[in-house]
Amino acid sequence: GHTLGNALRRILLSSMPGCAVTEVEIEGVLHEYSTKEGVQEDILEILLNLKGLAVKVAEGKDEVFITLNKSGSGPVVAGDITHDGDVEIANPEHVICHLTDDNAEIAMRIKVERGRGYVPASSRIHTEEDERPIGRLLVDATYSPVDKIAYAVEAARVEQRTDL
């Protein structure tokens, strides 16, 4: 029971193909340790919030770019992202950041890629170092569309045997 349940759990978490945010360019931001005027969260926290974005990309496309432009005070949610018909945001109420001033604005270009499992940003730094411009922020990618898995093992009975 546990052997089969754990094997299924591991396969569902590591081998299911999915889409995830892999790179972000935020206007006026050069690195992830900075802040942006008029935005409550720092850039690192915005990147963590973008990791929670559930994106579905049409079959046949391995990478797409989506944009987010918002101004005025209030929350910035995933539903504010502009995209074409090949992209679907599964959680449009997901909060990305909060703008604190009526004159505040945020503009970002987000790269979404298709993949499997988990790929840390540090593993992509070495392969893209030469062509990656300053200001393009890499994000750890969890491609699996499955968030949580639970299984239960129960005793089964066949005729007089109860140890199955």
Image (spheres, grey):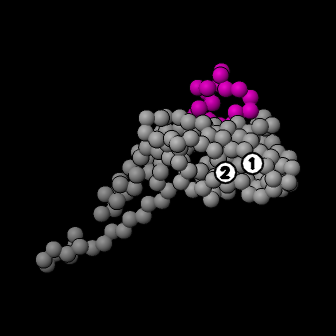
Identify residue for label 2.
80
Please say whether residue 43 is visible from this viewpoint.
no
Identify residue for label 1.
70
The mark nearer the N terminus, 2 or 1, is: 1
Give the answer, above or below, for where 71 lies relative to 153.
above
- Kindly identify the residue that appears in the image at 57 percent across and 56 percent down: 91
- Magenta includes 133? yes
Q: Nearer the viewer, residue 18 or 9?
A: 18
Q: Position of residue 66 (x, y in %)?
A: 62, 40
Q: What amino acid does circle 2 point to?
A: Asp
* Element carrying mark 1: strand
Q: State which region is magenta.
A: 118-138
Give the answer, above or below, for where 40 lies relative to 110.
below
Quadrant where the image shows the N terminus: bottom left
Q: What amino acid does circle 1 point to?
A: Lys
* Element carrying mark 2: helix
Residue 30: which disc? none
Q: Nearer the viewer, residue 28 or 33?
A: 28
